[in-house]
Amino acid sequence: MTNTNNEPGANRRVRGREFRPREPYTHRLRRILEEYPDGSQILREILQNSDDAKSTEQIFILDHNTYQSNKLLEPDLVNYERANLKLDRYQGPALLAKNNTIFEERDFDSLLKLADSEKQDQFDKIGVMGVGFNSIYHITDSPSFITGNKYVILDPHEWYFRGGIEYELVKDRLAEEYPDQFAPFSIRISCDEPFDNSFKQPFKGTIFRYPLRDSTESEISKKIYKPNEILDMFRRFYENESINCLLFLKYIECISFYELKKGANEPELIYKIELKNANEVRQNRRLIVENIIPMMDSLNSEKLGNNNQLETSYVASFCRQEGNSKEIYSKWLILNYLDDLLKTKKYFHEKFDKDIGAYKFIPNVGLAVPLNNLDATGRLFCFLPLPISMPFLVSVHGYFAVSTNRRSLWSPA
């Protein structure tokens, strides 16, 4: 017997009402910023991401200039609530962050996720929670970047694009067709720098550009950022973080800060922090990070041998320089140690019923001793320095359980 159209349920499509979270992207970013402090912490997050990307150099540039806006990309989002739909609002003063590695596919994926990091299972990366990058929204509403052959604009407000857009920079000849869009990226540190600012070839690195917020209409933050506040951020980083930020990083060897004044052709060096004997200590500095992934793979496949500890020590020579002043040198004895992974795995399984791989419970510890200043005060580190002083001159690094913003040790309270 078959149903007829008059019978209940016959050929009838039931329609429900759409029921899903609709929280705007901007509201989630605003809450993230409540946890991540403003100021030089932003530079620390950028630095950490560059180190995770295996960059050896990090350059920060404060650009005071406003660029022409005759030939800019056209928005692809018709937003009738906004009268001015030109991208010229982002042609003004900006912070630029430049390093010498190109984005991998997982890096793009991480930017699409607010709190689910692609680094969670990457044992050679510092990042875990995937929210640190978003601290940059303290100063900007629309970051953009060039990496390799890609040009990406992020637009959390959806004023111009649906959250963001990715272009093929070289293939689509964007810099030729929209020269004003890319003029702000074409800053040379010096005339000798091998840098194709026409972007006819893939860029051999990554340049982020963060236009400074100049309006209170943002739903992320109402704070307007002035160029002088970026200069103050640079100064505080140099005075308070300085060499400490290089002690336990794995790849970054030089951090420099520049200022490009209005109408200037080249930026001026403000501060520089550098590992001077990088060629001599590079192998020791990277010993653990370049072995931890194959060791964890062997651990997970139960093929790891009993002799699996790693230990390295070296003397690092650092220098600090302010503008054109004389370089200030200091030497540090640095020790890094990776303990027995088999014992660590067994301990965490028996004690907490947790897998060390899922939580990055890596028994990696380090010590740094200043050899030129015996009156120094040590700091507590989780790769980068925490705002916690030690009662002695030795700085101590470990895979500590830290708060989401990595500014304090985690506490169950």
Image (cartoon, grey):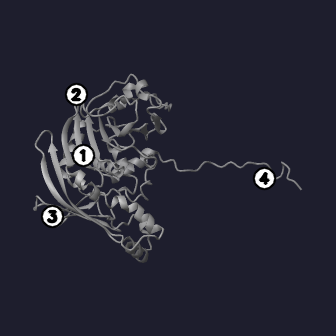
Q: Quadrant of residue 205?
A: top left
| Mark 4 neighbour density, 10 Å: few (under 14) some (14–19) many (20 or more) | few
Which mark is on residue 9? Answer: 4
**C-alpha gap between disc 2 and disc 1:** 22 Å
| Residue kind at label 4, given as amino acid type | Gly
Q: Nearer the viewer, residue 389 or 345?
A: 345
Q: CA distance from mark 4 to mark 2?
A: 75 Å
Closest to the camera, between mark 1 and mark 4, is 1
Find disc 2 in the rendering and name its residue.
Answer: 264
Q: Are marks 1 and 4 in contact (CB under 8 Å)?
A: no
Tag 1 secondary structure = strand
Circles 4, 3 touching at the beta carbon (< 8 Å): no
Measure the C-alpha gap from mark 1 to mark 4. Answer: 69 Å
The kind of residue tagged 2 is Ala
The CA span between labels 3 and 2 is: 43 Å
**Disc 1 target residue:** 255
* Badge 3 density bin: few <14, some 14–19, many ≥20, Cα 10 Å: some
| C-alpha separation, residue under disc 1 versus residue under disc 3 | 24 Å
Quarter of the image containing the C terminus?
A: bottom left
